[in-house]
Image (cartoon, rainbow, N blue to C red):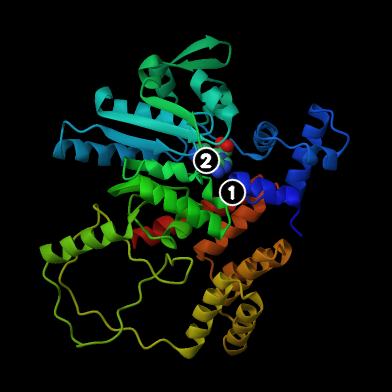
Amino acid sequence: MTTPAQVMLRAATGLNLSKQVVDRAIRARVVSVSARDADDYLERMTPEELTALVELVVVPESWFYRDQQAFHATAGYLKQQLQLDPNRLLHVLSLPCAGGEEPYTMAMVLLDAGIPADRFMIDAFDISPVCVARAKTGVYGRNAFRNQDLAFRDRHFEEVSKEAWRINDAVRRQVRFQQGNVLDLTMARRAAFYDVIFCRNLLIYFDKPTTSAAVRNLDTMLKRDGLLFVGYAEVPSLCANGFTPLQYAQAFGLVKNAEAALRKKACEVAAPAPARAVKSGPAPVPKRPLAAGGSPVTAASPAAPKPKPGPAPVPAPPPAPARDLLADARRLADLGQLKEAERLCRDHLAQQPEAAEAYFILGLINELTSKHAQAQDYWKRCIYLQPDHYEALCHLALLADTSGDAAGAAALKARAARIYQRQQAS
Ligand SMILES: C[S@@+](CC[C@H](N)C(=O)[O-])C[C@H]1O[C@@H](n2cnc3c(N)ncnc32)[C@H](O)[C@@H]1O
């Protein structure tokens, strides 16, 4: 059962926090403010105290050049934009920015790529005032430098004391830090302002409705043809909320669906469509990634080769009734009709006992009711039957993360990333 403190913190941050994490944070604050007990503490809650409590539940984990392909993809994209209009001022958003490692990396990569300092500006937000203050100081210890190649540190930092490096002013000037919540509606005032948005490693901690609310804000702030970069496990949520993945290897970039459709159309105009052998019929069903809602997503990319005329596509057979059961189960689960969704999955399994997708949906249903052990069991069965089930691997990684199994989580993430890359390439 969700406690009132969990509800309060979720309303403040969007984070889907376990009772243990919340109770631990409250115990620490009870001691700090000399409250009698948790009830006494919660009764005396103020906005300032809530901010202090939030500090104890956020995960401000970040480092320089983390998943660096996204930064290089951004540099390439922004250079293209400047070729089209050299007088433009380009805007990048890093939300959440944690201690500033991500936006500073962005600034270093863009400067190193030869983009003039007066052609781009980076805004960086995080809900945590402590993170924002740390980012503004620009001083970092060893933990922020986890990459093998540290040449960037020699170029852009100076050592200020033993094991502490301060970022140069030339890089600092490119980033504006501010406290901010991705769920705050006033964010949307920056409508169509950003050419590129980084929102990495936050949405995985949100539930579905919260993710949708956050994505709505990001969507509003992103220019029509802008790029959005997320963490690898967050791609499916974005697909379910109006975005299409691009084929930058390991960068996990997406564009708005409407923009993807336009790019696809431009490709079709450029290359004559192959003659169709069959007049009408259902379109071929692309392989994964699937949107969380169950609909397949076609990847469109500026880097994607133009379609070549080739053999006419073979129309897929009409969907089998068993497949409809699963689509219905997903839909019902989305609507919160979990019992009915579960029944459909079991009916499906009665017909096809090796249906990995049915086990995947059963995992989701159990996760939604906080039955984590059962969810894990179903997702394990899913990947046993279908070892490249990307979403199941992501969910298992998240479960391992939240239960403190960092090594297990890292292995599952690496496996999911490999599969994602393979699927993008195919
Ligand atoms: C794991 S860090 C990710 C930092 C960086 N994007 C990266 O990938 O390295 C997650 C950050 O999200 C911030 N955060 C949590 N909830 C937030 C919210 N609702 N709005 C903005 N930031 C939030 C936390 O304070 C934390 O610094």
Which corner quadrant holds the N terminus?
bottom right
Label 1 crowd bin: few (<14), some (14–19), many (20+), radius 10 Å: many
Q: Which mark is residue 181?
A: 2
At label 2, which amino acid type do we have? Asn
At label 1, which amino acid type do we have? Gly
Badge 2 or badge 1: first in the primary sequence: 1
Labels 2 and 1 touching (C-beta < 8 A): yes
**64 with respect to 8 (left or right):** left
- Tag count: 2
Q: Which mark is residue 14?
A: 1
Mark 2 residue element: loop
Residue drawn 35% across the image and 17% down it: 170
* Position of residue 408 measured from the top left corner of the image (x, y, whole percent): 64, 51
**361 with respect to 84 (left or right):** right
The front one of 394 and 216 is 216
Q: Which mark is residue 310?
A: none
Beta carbon at label 2 within 8 Å of ligand 1? yes
Residue drawn 53% across the image and 31% down it: 146
* Position of residue 270 measured from the top left corner of the image (x, y, whole percent): 11, 62
Q: Which of the 4 image quadrants contains residue 22?
A: top right
The quarter of the rendering in which ligand 1 is drawn is: top right
Residue drawn 61% across the image and 58% down it: 396
Determine if residue 251 is in view: no
In the image, residue 312 sits, relative to residue 183, either above or below, namely below
Determine if residue 298 is in view: yes
Mark 1 residue element: loop
Q: Which of the 4 image quadrants contains residue 94?
A: top left
Beta carbon at label 1 within 8 Å of ligand 1? yes
Label 2 crowd bin: few (<14), some (14–19), many (20+), radius 10 Å: some
In the image, residue 100 sits, relative to residue 202, either above or below, namely above
